[in-house]
Amino acid sequence: MKANLSAVLVLGLCGLAVAADEKADPVGTWKCEYDIGGQKRESTLTIKKDGDKLAGTMVYQDKQEAKLKDVTLKDGELTFSAERELKDMKIMIQYKLKVDGDKLQGKGEVEVGGEKREFEMAGKREKK
């Protein structure tokens, strides 16, 4: 009896994790806003399916486009990185964003000069 109850609980919890990922569909085009050093910034995040994997790009307000790396969705959290070129520097930015319907919210993290900096980010999915 205990084994059956344990199996039901495990399967139920696995079902909840799958349901969270199904509800959290990151595919689409997102208009994102964030603030770095007191300056408001905007970017456009595009996520698409590439077979059974996720892929995408981030276009920043200076029109520079970066291909996303290591795009994953787990338990409703979208994670990826993007390499940005600023002047003669290449900067890797790590993103962790919670997807909730047509909204996403989370943080970006960048290391500049050996110092890690975080910033809050929010986005809305564009209507088709």
Image (cartoon, helix red, strand yellow):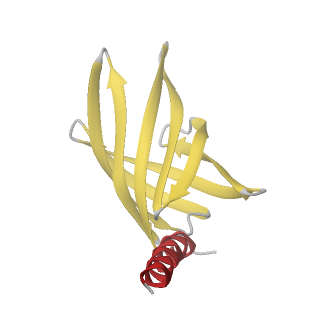
Q: Give the percent coordinates (x, y) of residue 115.
A: 26, 21
Identify the residue at the far front of this view: 1
Q: Residue at x 52, y 44 (%)?
A: 80
User: Which image quadrant for residue 105?
Assistant: bottom left
Identify the residue at the far bottom of this view: 1
Residue 19 as seen in the image, left or right of residue 118: right
Identify the residue at the far right of this view: 51
The quadrant the C terminus occupies is bottom right
**Vertical comparison of 9 with 123: above or below:** below
User: Which image quadrant for residue 5?
Assistant: bottom left
Q: Give the percent coordinates (x, y) of residue 50.
A: 75, 54
Identify the residue at the far left of this view: 38
- Numbered circles on residues, count: 0
Q: Give the percent coordinates (x, y) of residue 1.
A: 45, 87
Instruction: Choose between 76 and 91: the one closer to the eye.
Output: 76
Q: Residue at x 59, y 41 (%)?
A: 70
Q: Residue at x 28, y 38 (%)?
A: 118
Q: Give the percent coordinates (x, y) of residue 32.
A: 43, 55
Instruction: Choose between 93 and 76: the one closer to the eye.
Output: 76
Q: Residue at x 47, y 17 (%)?
A: 87
**Vertical comparison of 96 with 19: above or below:** above
**Vertical comparison of 43 with 124: above or below:** above
